[in-house]
């Protein structure tokens, strides 16, 4: 089994290097300004420049306006736009066709019934990411990156016409169980490789990738 790994919310050259050297398949930067992981378009350009084709270069957006996406794409070379807000089917399609860059729509899961929402987006999205819905009891939840998981068995035995990943509260300790229960072919992590929100730890990045690749 070869599990793909995405490291999300990278914001320093050191942690970007750690992700690439460890063999991450996707490296991502966050463009949601309220997030402790967000970067400017200029910094994203610097971080992504040395990546080349060593990994898929991802930009995370939350209900972003065209002008902002345009500014980012002028500054940074991105291969995939992660749409982590409340983007409608029409908006996802408009971003994908308007910018000519593949998109990955995020489906937020609280209960088993949420999984079916993926069907609406299969036509217009190149990839799908399942993440935990922000918990209602958190004081200031972000639209993602809250280090919470959902019940991975909701995804078990399911298949879709587009490639997909699992996110939400993944760590080096729980990733094997997450793959076993969900059948995920790819894992996405942010908080689980940090010392505190926004501060990635190169050792944790390496350990996460090593563990995922050992499955
Ligand atoms: O990480 C953030 O700050 C963030 C902000 C807004 C939308 C999404 C965000 N994070 C993404 O959420 C998933 C799961 O993260 P975690 O591993 O549970 O911390 C991942 O794609 C993050 O990049």
Image (tube, rainbow, N blue to C red):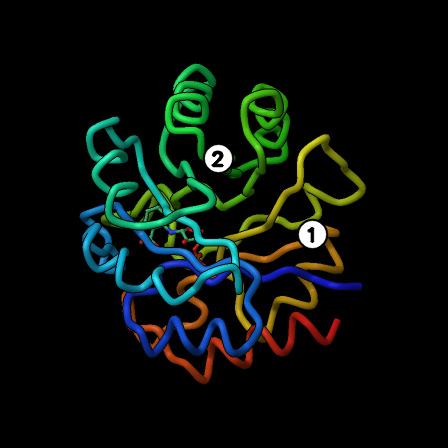
2 or 1: tag closer to the N-terminus: 2
Pick whichever, 141 or 143, lies toward us.
143
Position above or below: 173 against 198? below
Residue 184's disc number: 1
Position above or below: 125 against 45? above
Instruction: State the image coordinates of residue 100 (x, y, percent, origin top left).
Output: 44, 29
Instruction: State the image coordinates of residue 18 (x, y, percent, origin top left).
Output: 44, 78
Pick whichever, 7 or 114, lies toward us.
7
- For label 2, the residue is 103
Residue that appears at 21% across and 50% down: 41
Position above or below: 11 against 56? below
Pick whichever, 156 or 112, lies toward us.
156
Q: Is residue 150 left or right of residue 73?
A: right
Dot 1 surroundings within 10 Å: few (below 14), some, or many (20 or more)? many
SS type, badge 1: loop
Instruction: State the image coordinates of residue 94 (x, y, percent, origin top left).
Output: 40, 19
Circles 2 and 1, Cβ within 8 Å, touching? The answer is no
Dot 2 surroundings within 10 Å: few (below 14), some, or many (20 or more)? many
Position above or below: 15 against 184? below
SS type, badge 2: strand
């Amino acid at each position: 089994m070869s599990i793909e790994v995405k490291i999300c919310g990278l914001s320093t050259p050191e942690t970007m290097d750690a992700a690439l050297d460890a063999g991450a398949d996707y490296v991502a930067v966050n463009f949601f300004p309220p997030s402790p992981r967000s970067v400017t378009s200029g910094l994203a350009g610097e971080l992504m420049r040395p990546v080349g084709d060593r990994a898929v270069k991802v930009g995370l957006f939350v209900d972003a306006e065209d002008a902002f996406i345009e500014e980012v794409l002028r500054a940074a070379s991105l291969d995939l736009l992660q749409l982590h807000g409340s983007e409608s089917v029409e908006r996802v399609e408009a971003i994908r066709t308007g910018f000519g860059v593949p998109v990955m729509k995020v489906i937020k899961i609280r209960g088993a019934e949420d999984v079916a929402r993926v069907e609406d987006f299969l036509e217009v999205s190149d990839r799908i990411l399942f993440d935990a819905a922000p918990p209602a009891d958190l004081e200031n939840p972000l639209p993602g990156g809250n280090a919470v998981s959902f019940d991975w068995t909701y995804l078990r035995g399911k298949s879709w016409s587009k490639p997909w990943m699992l996110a939400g509260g993944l760590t080096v300790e729980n990733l094997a169980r997450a793959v076993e229960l969900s059948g995920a072919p790819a894992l996405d992590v942010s908080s689980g490789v940090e010392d505190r929100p926004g501060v990635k730890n190169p050792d944790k990045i390496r350990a996460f990738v090593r563990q995922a690749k050992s499955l």
